Amino acid sequence: MAALLVLYLVFVTNYAILLINSAEPVAKALGFALVVLPAIGAWVLIADLVFVVRGERLLAKLGSEGGLPVDNLPRLPSGRADPVAADAEFPMYRAEVDADPESWRAWLRLGLAYDASGDRRRARWATRKAIALHRSTGT
């Protein structure tokens, strides 16, 4: 998907340059406006890639410490964890964060619990919180 986005950004930038080089004032204005889209797209892509790299580093660190939760959840035919079973384990991870809200490890495990429950938005939010706490504490 990242490669397709880069390809799209190249084509949009090329088209914007063609419009900017046009003699028509409306086309020039549209070209300058169109330059904004690739800039936003590039920023989103870079931010997402940085998030993934930082999240993977934290997962590797937590795994090397033996702190990853045991994945013994039943699976759906698609291979995803059964959300009902994941929801049953969720309170344990929420309580861990409530007990130690400054622990990046607890937040990362909560992010994994959200992901297993199928809540990607909250999983990303909890993982971002874990990354921020790790960066601020350095442990």
Image (cartoon, rainbow, N blue to C red):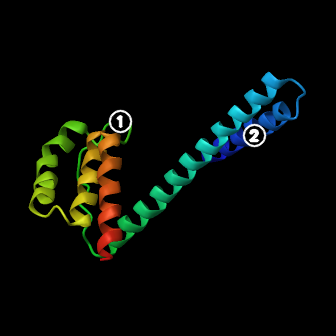
Asked which secondary structure carries label 2, the reply is: helix
Image location (x, y in percent) of residue 99: 9, 61
Q: Nearer the viewer, mark 1 or mark 2?
A: 2
Q: Quadrant of residue 108?
A: bottom left
Note whether 105 is above or below 27 in the view shown: below
CA distance for labels 1 and 2: 43 Å
Residue visible at 26% across and 55% down in the picture: 71
Nearer to us in this view, 28 or 128: 28
Q: Which amino acid does label 1 sit on?
A: Pro
Dividing the image into 4 quarters, which one contains the C terminus?
bottom left
Residue position marked by numbered label 1 in the rendering: 77
Residue visible at 21% across and 66% down in the picture: 103
Q: How crowded is mark 2: few (under 14 residues within 10 Å), some or many (20 or more)?
A: many
Residue position marked by numbered label 2 in the rendering: 13
Image location (x, y in percent) of residue 116: 28, 45
Q: What residue type is labelled 2?
A: Thr
